[in-house]
Image (spheres, rainbow, N blue to C red):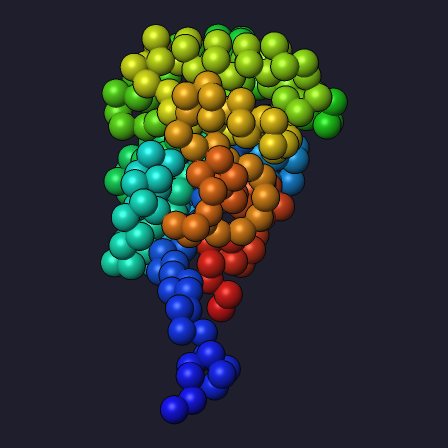
Amino acid sequence: MVSPRRAGRDPNPDPPARVASLKLPILGYHAVLPLATSEQVRGTVAVHDFRLQIEWLVRRGYLGISVSEAAARLRRDDPQQDRAVVLTFDDGYRSVIEHALPVLEESGFTATLYIVTAAMDRTTDWYVKKGGRAFPHASWNELENAAKRGFDIGSHSVDHLRLSKVADEVLTDQLQRSRAEIAQRVGACDHFAYPFGDVSEKVIQATKAAGYQTAVTTLKGFNTPDTAPFELRRQMVSRTTSLRRFRRKVGHWW
């Protein structure tokens, strides 16, 4: 008799790799403004365009969910739950509270808002350098109300710094202090978005140590049960995102 090994077969083969059945897109937005597309600055989306995007998702049978729900679905890896798209908003702009959340609620969608805690109740000039104008951030009362309506409030750090470039003690402070303040204000803070998408192994480990459950990057791609929870992929949406490009970001190539 020829042995399996001599026949070229491993008598103790590794189990076949699991094929992930669930693929979740995460979309990233910033400000949502009542302006014509041509008047916007980079990184913003017109309310009209945002509404068209949400209406397209509804027609296609998608459900807009938060990062908390996405994390649970990825753990379950349920192929029956793949008609979902994760909606996220960075920086905590008041325009998102005023213009985006009502559109989402009309469709039964929810989302995650990643806020810069030191910017709350303030107006920042981050877009002025890009040829835009200053945008006000939401108040804590507005964020508390959004949380009561079912929206996740996550952290985008205290001061929106490039975390891979700061000293260890600053990194720890940016992660821990923002999480603690959000938890105190709205009841929980389990999710993080790396400012500028700037991430390194040190930043990942510090984010885990600070008590977060997930973190999103700006790396393109889709998320499966095999995606590392602190390296979640995200497709950014801006004023230059046509509806055709939007469909592709969700995973429709036709």
Q: Quadrant of the N terminus?
A: bottom left
Name the residue rendered at 47%, 86% in the picture: 7
From what the image shows, is residue 248 above or below residue 229? below
Q: Quadrant of residue 124?
A: top right
Name the residue rendered at 35%, 9% in the picture: 185
Q: Residue furthest bottom?
A: 1
Is residue 88 found left or right of 101 in the rendered image? right
Name the residue rendered at 55%, 14% in the picture: 172
The residue closer to the viewer here, 193 or 231, is: 231
Locate residue 216, reporting x and y percent: 50, 35
Please indicate, yes or no, whether residue 99 appears anywhere in the rendered image.
Answer: no
From what the image shows, is residue 25 above or below residue 80? above
Locate residue 215, reporting x and y percent: 48, 32
Locate residue 228, reporting x and y percent: 47, 42
Name the residue rendered at 63%, 22% in the picture: 163
Q: Residue furthest front?
A: 1
Locate residue 85, reporting x and y percent: 38, 47
The residue closer to the viewer here, 5 or 154, is: 5
Please indicate, yes or no, whether residue 212 appears anywhere in the rendered image.
Answer: yes
The residue closer to the viewer here, 191 or 46, is: 191
From what the image shows, is residue 164 above or below residue 36? above
Q: Quadrant of residue 152?
A: top left
Q: How many marks?
A: 0
